[in-house]
Image (cartoon, helix red, strand yellow):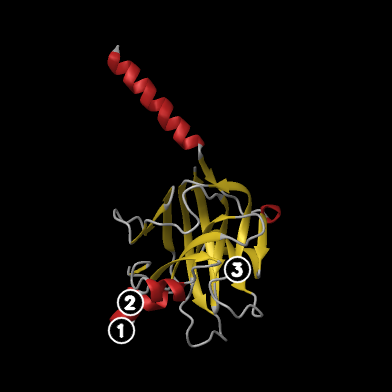
Amino acid sequence: MKLYRFLFIGALVFSTLKLNAQVIRFEKDKLEPNQVSMSVEKLQGKEVIKVTKNKEIKEVDQPTFVKIKGINFQNGTIEVLVLSRLLPDAPEFSRGFIGVAFRINDDNSKFESIYIRPTNARADDQIRRNHSIQYFSFPDFPFSRLRKDSPEKYESYTDMVLNEWIKIKITVKDAKAQLYINDAAQPSLIVNDLKHGADSSGAIGLWVDVGTEGYFADLKITN
């Protein structure tokens, strides 16, 4: 009897966890572009969102994303496939910047973000390789400030390339976030002090920066 009770409770918990996992359909009325252009397309048989940063936005680490409407995310897991290409007119410093913004407030003036720089991962320069992954917090902690104040703390390396699907998984618990790449068992980046604090919450955004033609697919959110 105890075994059956255990199995029943386990099944109930598993079902509850499954119910909390949302697979996000890319329907235009649920997508809100902010300082980017976007389109829903098909790529390699997948329904994708194509995103490029508006060219008049010259600063980096800005709220340049497609916000997913109707989601309030505090703790949980974000999973998405990303693919980045360089635009024909991409500046020399472009790296294929693409990632996820999370805990975005209503007016897009505060959020956390983790993104990748695929071209860095196979550069013939170890310092660039070490900068393949980046955390930043808008508006007060762009990558330049974090790199100056806390060198290497908010950046890391994982192998990746342009023009290939890369699976990003971000787990968030209070003031801690971890990034996993391509179903790795261990995180590639650990952030223990999210700058907006443990109680922050908000929307999720599909983020790109200068020079990137970004594609997103198979977005799943678990709260």
Q: Considering only order in the chain, which callout, 1 or 3, is on the residue closer to the N terminus?
A: 3
Q: Nearer the viewer, residue 141 or 186?
A: 141
Q: Residue at x 53, y 62 (%)?
A: 216
Q: Position of residue 223 (x, y in %)?
A: 49, 42
> In the figure, residue 36 lies in which quadrant?
bottom right
SS state under label 2: helix
The residue carrying mark 2 is 129
> In the figure, residue 186 lies in which quadrant?
bottom left
The residue carrying mark 1 is 125
Amino acid beneath label 1: Asp
Spatial CA distance of label 3 from label 1 is 28 Å
Instruction: Spot the residue most to the front.
Output: 149
Q: Given contact means CB atoms under 8 Å apart, are the residues at marks 2 and 1 in contact?
A: yes
Spatial CA distance of label 2 from label 3 is 24 Å
SS state under label 3: loop
Residue 64's label in the rendered image is: 3
Q: Position of residue 205 (x, y in %)?
A: 57, 59
Amino acid beneath label 2: Arg
Q: Residue at x 60, y 66 (%)?
A: 63
Spatial CA distance of label 2 from label 1 is 6 Å
Query: With 110 as the anchor, is 159 left or right in this view?
Result: left
Query: With 1 as the anchor, is 218 left or right in this view?
Result: right
Mark yes or no: residue 76 visible. Answer: yes
User: Which corner quadrant holds the N terminus?
Assistant: top left
